[in-house]
Image (tube, rainbow, N blue to C red):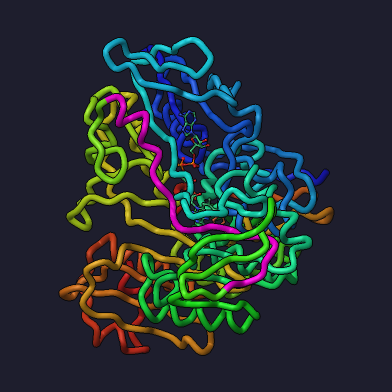
Amino acid sequence: MPKITYIEHNGAEHVVEAQTGVSVMEAAVKNMVPGIDADCGGACACATCHVYVDPAWLEKTGKAEPMEESMLDFAYQPKENSRLSCQITVRAELDGLIVRLPEFQG
Amino acid sequence: MSGQAVIIGAGQAGAQGAQSLRAAGYEGRIILLGEEPAAPYQRPPLSKAYLQGTLSADRLALKPEAFYAQNGVDLRLGVKAAAIDRKNARVAIEGGEAIAYDRLLLATGAPPRRLHCPGTELTGVHYLRTIADCEGLRPVLAGARRLVIVGAGYIGLEVAASARKAGREVTVLEAQARVLQRVAGPEISAFFESLHRAHGVDLRLGAALSHFEGRGRIERAALMSGETIDCDAALIGVGAMPAIELAKDAGLAIDNGVTTDEHAATSDPAIYAAGDCASHPSKLYGRRMRLESVPNAIEQAKVAAANMAGGSLVYDAVPWFWSDQYDVKLQTAGVAEGADETVVRGDPAAARFTVWSLKEGRVLAVDAVNDPGGFLAAKKIIAAKTPLDAKTLADPATDLKSLAS
Ligand SMILES: Cc1cc2nc3c(=O)[nH]c(=O)nc-3n(C[C@H](O)[C@H](O)[C@H](O)COP(=O)(O)OP(=O)(O)OC[C@H]3O[C@@H](n4cnc5c(N)ncnc54)[C@H](O)[C@@H]3O)c2cc1C
Ligand code: FES
């Protein structure tokens, strides 16, 4: 199972073994990683699953779709490498993925 | 502070309440009672991905199993609270021993409103609220010849979309003149009416159900007009009723739901309520409202839990909701009731637009079709009570992002 590292705003690291096919958001929720609220449960409706993808991984995670992009504009402190984690599906090639969490969601 | 907090209802609000009690530093015992056999789960997929079979059951759970033990939450499933004895601060359990509380959270939700016409007892007539209901409905998507849906609210329309995706013939009966009448304006209704018709739904407006007919199994739906529609399944989606019996029998104040103050406390200061069952005073709208949505259940339960742990938070979030039908996402912020003006931004024909409902230069509500950015801007504008006139809004050059920040 691919390993994903979530780094909280305060620096706390959580390394999680994620099932392929679920989203990076679901893998966090399933492993009780704090800092991802995911109020809509992955419906791409709430923007409370915001993460910063480690720049080294941006190519593999891919870019946000236009709808997601327009939501990120309203996330707390969006950056170039912002994504909604419910829109990234865990795949074998994401083994080792690192994402950082913003100070606040929504 | 130690003690014992009891939460009645292990759904969206109940699970959030347990989590937020701990987050607020509550050190007492937490007992979470759920009548259903399943641990707290998400209901939205029950009319969408889970109904369509594209989401597995383990992905419905709101929390991993380990959450409950790790947070000292005593989750008791298949357990029904039968009564609240306020004098002795105890919850009576059906077929079990009463449980003492010093803080109680009512999170009992809102089961479907039942129809009482002849034929609702026939096999093949469904309601949709729980996993069990959804599992009853799934074979219909796999093989029914025609599904009749009574009520063109969110649940009726989402199930219609899921059933069409599965290739079923679908007739939707709506007694009102337009779909989503209770929750959306005419522009949104018109959009969803053509969307469903374009996907092959036989949508009948102003069509009231009289009753169902069949021998043991449903065979047809009879309309008030005298017309009948042959079918082998029906879904009734005519709204939900707040589960208030426990509160009412215990003498708590009721007003279209368990009455709470702005701190989510009921008329008994030891008892709080959150989610679909609760009616709260909205400062933003200057009136009492009861909402049925995931965000409301989450935010209200957070406030209730923090206050049960000794805090004094106020619940005054902007109501919001989403619905997915076919490849269309609808998001609604605010409540449009009382609006005196509407402005459409974007292009309904291109299936990407927002409808703004205004009153005296203030935005009351926004419906966003395939425009989540517009929706998030609207949510901020409504919360900040940013003054906005129809002319500015109607101007495509107006930048919502800057207005929202
Ligand atoms: C099919 C469907 C689709 C939906 N789609 C959306 C959507 O897309 N977006 C959105 O925002 N909202 C949606 N909703 C609404 C949303 O799911 C609800 O608003 C939300 O679940 C409310 O949470 P709650 O905790 O108040 O109630 P619930 O989640 O219903 O939980 C209440 C629980 O309390 C239990 N209970 C009741 N009485 C007792 C008792 N006496 N003893 C023990 N247990 C008891 C019930 O069995 C139930 O499990 C949908 C709802 C349904 C049914
Ligand atoms: S979980 Fe709501 S947008 Fe990702």
Tell me the quarter of the image containing the N terminus of chain B: top left
Task: Please say if B234 is above or below B226.
Answer: above
Q: Specify whether residue B274 is in view.
A: yes
Q: Is residue B348 above or below residue B338?
A: below
- The reply, left or right, for residue B9 in relation to residue B182 is right
Classify residue B357 as left or right of residue B13: left
Q: Position of residue B247 (x, y in %)?
A: 32, 30
The reply to whether the magenta stretch includes residue B76 is no
Question: Does residue B239 belong to the magenta stretch?
Answer: yes
Q: Nearer the viewer, residue B400 or B81?
A: B81
Ligand 2 - quadrant of the structure image: bottom right
Residue in the image at 36% along x and 23% along y: B104
How far across and how far down the image is residue B203, in percent? 55, 77
The residue nearer to you, when weighing A6 against A27, is A27
Residue B34 versus residue B387 in the image, above or below:
above
Task: Determine the residue positioned at 44% across, 26% down.
Answer: B7
Percent across and percent down for residue B147 are: 66, 65
Going 56% across and 52% down the picture, which residue do you hit?
Answer: B120
Give the quadrant of the C terminus of chain B.
bottom left
* Frontmost residue, B171 versus A61: B171
Percent across and percent down for residue B161 are: 62, 69
Q: Which residues are magenta?
A: B228-250
Residue B199 quadrant: bottom right
Give the camera-side residue of B266 and A93.
B266
Q: Specify whether B284 is left or right of A95.
A: left
Instruction: Determine the residue positioned at 67% across, 66% down.
Output: B231
User: Can residue A23 be spotted in the picture?
Assistant: no
Picture quadrant where residue B251 is located: top left
Quarter of image, res B255: top left
Instruction: Say how many tags the image has.
Output: 0
